[in-house]
Image (tube, helix red, strand yellow):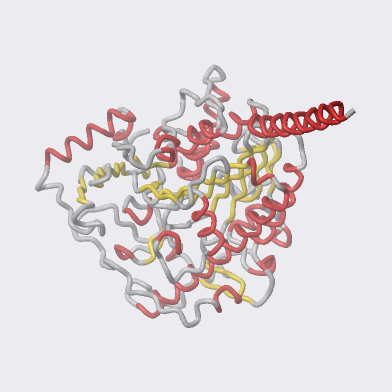
C-alpha cells in the first residue's frame, strides 16, 4: 500500500512537471505579437535621450526595459516619405518628388505592374497569419485612406495591408479634420491657425485622446484572440499646431531651458529651409529666429506636447500589461523624423541636417533582458521591417533595403559599418559614424565631420574631395544612380 502511494505521488509530480514543460513550450512556440507605436514629429527630446528637463516617464520606462538606438535616422525628413520607408522597408527614391503621396503612388504602380512582389510590412505579417490593425496616423493619412476628407474606403494608402484601419474622428468629423485638429473639435483653417494653443480639460480635447482610447480597445480585443497580432497605433502630437491640454503645459511653468545651440543660418549653400510649414501659422507677428523669448515659449509648448504623447504611451503599455499579452509582445516606439527647434535657424523638418533626420527608436523584446542597453551604431528606418521579421521568426523579404538589427541587439561589441541614407525631393545624404555628406540637385555638396563638429556648422567638403568621392560612391553602391537622379 505504501509503495502504491509513493508511486501515485511520483506519477502526479511527473505529470505536473510534464504539463508545466508543455505549457512553457507552447508559450515559446506561440508567434510573437507586435505593438508598434508611431509618434509624429518626435525628435529625441526625451529624458532617456539625455534631455533632462523633458517629462517622459513612460517612454523612458520602455527604454529602461528595452533596447535604445541613440543614432537612429529616418530615410526622409517628411511624414509621408518617412512612413513609406518604415512600412515598406524600401527607400523609395523613385517617389522622391511625390512628397506625402508616396504610398498612393506605390499603389498605382502595383496596379499597373501586378507581377511585382512588393508587400508592405503589415501585409507581410498578414500573409503569415497575423491580424493586422492600425489606429490613428500610421501611414501619412490618419486612418490610411484617400479622398477629399481622407475617408474614402475605395482609396486605401496600403491595399490588403490591414485587417482593419481605424481613425476615430469624434467632433472633428473627418480624418483630415483630425490631422491638424484644435481643441474641442475645432479644425484648423486659414482663419483659425494659431501655432500655439492650450485649453483646460481632459486628454480627449485633442484627437490623440481618441486615438489612444481606440488603440487600447483594439489591444484588449486582439490580446483575447487566438491569432498573433500586429497592432500599430499612431499619435499625432507633437505635430503642429502645438496644442495641448493645459495641465501638460503647467508642468513646464518653472522649467529652465538652455539656449538653442547653433541658432544661426548656415553660411553658403546648404540643406537649409525657410521653415515654410511653421511660418504659415499665425505667430502674432513674432519670429522665433529673432525673438528668443518666443523661441523659449515654443520649446515649452513642444515639450508639453511630448509629455502629452508620453501619457498616451503609458496608457497603451499599461493596457498591454493588464491583458497579459506583454509577455509575448514585441514593442517598438518610433519617431517618424526629427524636428528643428531653432537649430540652424530652422523651425520644422524638410531638410537634411542632423536635427531633422535623427529620431527615437526603442525596441522591447520580452525574450531578452536588455535592461536599457543602448547602441550608438548608426541605424536607419528601413532596418525596422527586417528586424521585426527576425524577432518574430518570419522570413525576411529579399525586397527589403534594410538589415536586421538583431545581431547588434544581441552583441553590443559587434563592430558595424552601417550608414543611414536619406533624401528630400532635391537632395541626398548619408550619415556614417564619422561623417555626414549631402549632395543637392543644384550641384553643391556638404561634408561635416561628426567627430569634430556635431553641430554640422563647418562644411569641409572643399578640403576633403577624396572623402566626398568615397561617400558619394558608397551611396551609389547602396541604392544606385537613382540616388542622384533629380528627374524621377
Give the residue furthest to the front. 2
Q: Quadrant of the N terminus?
A: top right
Give the residue furthest to the top. 115
Q: Hey, which quadrant is residue 442 in on the image?
A: top left
User: How far from the left and from the top, in percent, is residue 423?
Assistant: 36, 42
> Residue at image x 52%, y 27%?
109
> Residue at image x 45%, y 72%?
298
Give the residue furthest to the bottom. 254
Res 146 seen here: no
User: How far from the left and from the top, in percent, is residue 199?
Assistant: 63, 76
Q: Nearer the viewer, residue 30 or 249?
A: 30
- Total marks placed: 0
User: How far from the left and from the top, in percent, is residue 193?
Assistant: 54, 68
The vertical placement of 110 against 66, above or below, is above
Q: Hey, which quadrant is residue 114 in on the image?
A: top right
> Residue at image x 35%, y 56%?
355
The vertical placement of 178 against 251, above or below, is above
Q: Is residue 30 left or right of residue 421?
A: right
User: How far from the left and from the top, in percent, is residue 434?
Assistant: 23, 46
Give the residue furthest to the right. 1
Q: Quadrant of the C terminus?
A: top left
Q: Nearer the viewer, residue 463 or 420?
A: 420
> Residue at image x 55%, y 22%?
112
Q: Hey, which quadrant is residue 338 in on the image?
A: bottom left
Res 395 seen here: yes
Q: Is residue 419 left or right of residue 6?
A: left
Q: Is residue 336 left or right of residue 159?
A: left
Amino acid at each position: 500500500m505504501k509503495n502504491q502511494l509513493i508511486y501515485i505521488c511520483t506519477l502526479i509530480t511527473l505529470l505536473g512537471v510534464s504539463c508545466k514543460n508543455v505549457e512553457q513550450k507552447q508559450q515559446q512556440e506561440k508567434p510573437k505579437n507586435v505593438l508598434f507605436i508611431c509618434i509624429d514629429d518626435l525628435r529625441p527630446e526625451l529624458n532617456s535621450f539625455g534631455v533632462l528637463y523633458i517629462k517622459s516617464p513612460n517612454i523612458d520606462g520602455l527604454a529602461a526595459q528595452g533596447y535604445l538606438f541613440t543614432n537612429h535616422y529616418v530615410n526622409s525628413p517628411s511624414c509621408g516619405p518617412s512612413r513609406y520607408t518604415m512600412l515598406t522597408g524600401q527607400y523609395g527614391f523613385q517617389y522622391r518628388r511625390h512628397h506625402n503621396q508616396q504610398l498612393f503612388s506605390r499603389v498605382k504602380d502595383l496596379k499597373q505592374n501586378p507581377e511585382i512582389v512588393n508587400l508592405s510590412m503589415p501585409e507581410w505579417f498578414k500573409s503569415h497569419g497575423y491580424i493586422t490593425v492600425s489606429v490613428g496616423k500610421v501611414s501619412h493619412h490618419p486612418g490610411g485612406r484617400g479622398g477629399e476628407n481622407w475617408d474614402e474606403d475605395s482609396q486605401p494608402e496600403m491595399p490588403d495591408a490591414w485587417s482593419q484601419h481605424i481613425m476615430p474622428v469624434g467632433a472633428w468629423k473627418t480624418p483630415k479634420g483630425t490631422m491638424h485638429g484644435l481643441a474641442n473639435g475645432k479644425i484648423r483653417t486659414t482663419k483659425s491657425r494659431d501655432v500655439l494653443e492650450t485649453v483646460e480639460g481632459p486628454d480627449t480635447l485633442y484627437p490623440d485622446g481618441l486615438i489612444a482610447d481606440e488603440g487600447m480597445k483594439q489591444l484588449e480585443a486582439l490580446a483575447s484572440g487566438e491569432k498573433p497580432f500586429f497592432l500599430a497605433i499612431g499619435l499625432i502630437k507633437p505635430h503642429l499646431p502645438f496644442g495641448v491640454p493645459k495641465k501638460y503645459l503647467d508642468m513646464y511653468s518653472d522649467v529652465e531651458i538652455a539656449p538653442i545651440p547653433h541658432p544661426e543660418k548656415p553660411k553658403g549653400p546648404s540643406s537649409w529651409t525657410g521653415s515654410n510649414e511653421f511660418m504659415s501659422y499665425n505667430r502674432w507677428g513674432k519670429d522665433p529666429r529673432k525673438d528668443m523669448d518666443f523661441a523659449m515659449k515654443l520649446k515649452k509648448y513642444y515639450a508639453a506636447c511630448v509629455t502629452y504623447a508620453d501619457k498616451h504611451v503609458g496608457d497603451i503599455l499599461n493596457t498591454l500589461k493588464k491583458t497579459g499579452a506583454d509577455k509575448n509582445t514585441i514593442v517598438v516606439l518610433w519617431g517618424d523624423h526629427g524636428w528643428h527647434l531653432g537649430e540652424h535657424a530652422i523651425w520644422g523638418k524638410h531638410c537634411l541636417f542632423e536635427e531633422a533626420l535623427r529620431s527615437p527608436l526603442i525596441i522591447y523584446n520580452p525574450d531578452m533582458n536588455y535592461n536599457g542597453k543602448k547602441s550608438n551604431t548608426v541605424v536607419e528606418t528601413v532596418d525596422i521591417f527586417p528586424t521585426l521579421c527576425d524577432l518574430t521568426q518570419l522570413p525576411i523579404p529579399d525586397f527589403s533595403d534594410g538589415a536586421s538589427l538583431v545581431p547588434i541587439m544581441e552583441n553590443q561589441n559587434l563592430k558595424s559599418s552601417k550608414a543611414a541614407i536619406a533624401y528630400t525631393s532635391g537632395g541626398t545624404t548619408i550619415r556614417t559614424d564619422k561623417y555626414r555628406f549631402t549632395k543637392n540637385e543644384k550641384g553643391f555638396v556638404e561634408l561635416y565631420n561628426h567627430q569634430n563638429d556635431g553641430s554640422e556648422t563647418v562644411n569641409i567638403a572643399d578640403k576633403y574631395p577624396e572623402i566626398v568621392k568615397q561617400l558619394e560612391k558608397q551611396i551609389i553602391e547602396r541604392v544606385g544612380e537613382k540616388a542622384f537622379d533629380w528627374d524621377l
